[in-house]
Image (cartoon, rainbow, N blue to C red):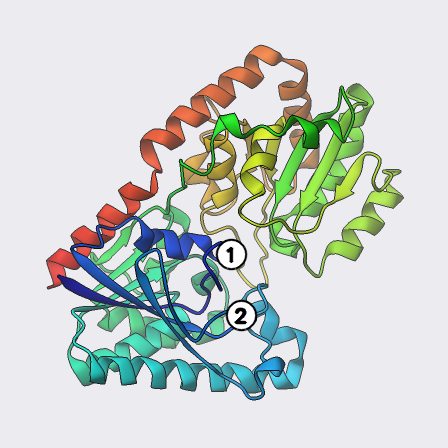
Amino acid sequence: MKKILVIASSFPRYKDDWWQRAVLSIYDNMDLKKYHVTVVAPSAPGAKSSEKINGIYIERFTYFYPKSLQLLTSGEGVLYSSKKNKYLGKIQVITFVIAEFVKTISLLASRDFDVIHANWILPQGLVAIIAKFIFRKPVVITVHGTDVFALKKLNIVKKFILRFCDVCTANSSATLEAVNEIYSSPKNKIVYMGVDLKTFRPENIDNKWRQAFGEDAKLILSVGRLIKWKGFEYLVRAFPKVLEEVPSAKLLLIGKGPEEDNLKKIAQKLGLELDKNIFFLGTFGPDKLPNIYASVDIVVSPSVTIAKTGEKEGMGNVVLEARASGVPVIASRSGGLKDTVDGKTNGLQFEERDYQQLAKHIKYLLLDKKAHDGFARNGYKYVKENFAWKVASTRFCELYETLV
């Protein structure tokens, strides 16, 4: 049995948690009779210090005392959370890295692992490389997007990490391109993340939930943290044009974040009415999202690239989950979204920030049932054949085997 030590800065806090479910899914779909997986993750509200989830062992570290003052694991992402409190956030980034390093080293010293697998290049990649030098274990780095798109001032550190890791996997061609700009190597490869086809299914329609918005309502959904690079502003700006031809349309936004108040102001300036034709629904757990996806008419991912920081979409799980639920998608040509939405048969595309084009696409799918159903059918088939989690997990296992 191969023993894998995984390091992650974000991980589900309990069995049914929605937070970074994708990271858990990588290992959840491996043959755990062949692989013993232990995950090093930060402590968080509601999380046990040590537990077993679906056959995977979790060891959590505390990075600040008292625990009630820990800021970085609130569910909003370490990078964003560190900026919310300028001074305490910076201090906790330092203590986070130290605590993660100590936990990783202590586990490697006390147990015999075959491979170290770091999710996100910083800080986990750095911790993994130092551990490699000490314990002579092969290292796999998985880059998820923001970790290479942002923090460009630390590119020299990233280059060091990429040079000494044994394999680096990126979740899309856009992410791989960013990795190769820092350090180009044949050991840098694409391994696409997957979608849980047992959870996200067309049969999950919740008619009662759907009818709460009106018998004849046409529901357009977008899901994600309400932050600038998710591009929700352009979906909001597109919506008045949609209402001109489809007055029964409703725009549903699921997520929380610093842009919420700004988005509400933009909506009101455009004449949109909160809780009438635009709805800010907050967050939902993984038990409810599959029903919501299957119950709407269209899912939109309007992500953009932020030139100043380099932030953009790494891959875009939302468009995978939506199509697995039998719903057609519209996505911007941003980052990794270009890898999974072709703009021809499995989903529609629009240029970043072009809300006029986005509005046309939404109206097209709402008014042309044949086109709507065709994109839904083709999108479902495409995701089912190419993005089952088992495919991604098998690819990682193949990489492990080349290193041991």
Q: Considering only vertical position in the picture, is 148 above or below 300?
A: below
Q: Amino acid at mark 2?
A: Val
Q: Are marks 1 and 2 in contact (CB under 8 Å)?
A: no
Q: Amino acid at mark 1?
A: Asp
Task: Give the image quarter of residue 378.
Answer: top left
Q: Looking at the image, can residue 375 be seen?
A: yes
How far across and how far down the image is residue 18, in percent? 52, 54
Q: Looking at the image, can residue 177 be seen?
A: no
- The residue identified by callout 2 is 78
Q: Considering only vertical position in the picture, is 161 above or below 275?
A: below
Label 2 Cα neighbours within 10 Å, binned few <14 / some 14-19 / many ≥20: some
Task: Give the image quarter of residue 144.
Answer: bottom left
Q: Nearer the viewer, residue 320 or 165?
A: 320
Which residue sits at x=75%, y=24%?
A: 217
How far is the residue under mark 1 from the one under mark 2? 17 Å
Which residue sits at x=29%, y=46%?
A: 392
- The residue identified by callout 1 is 17
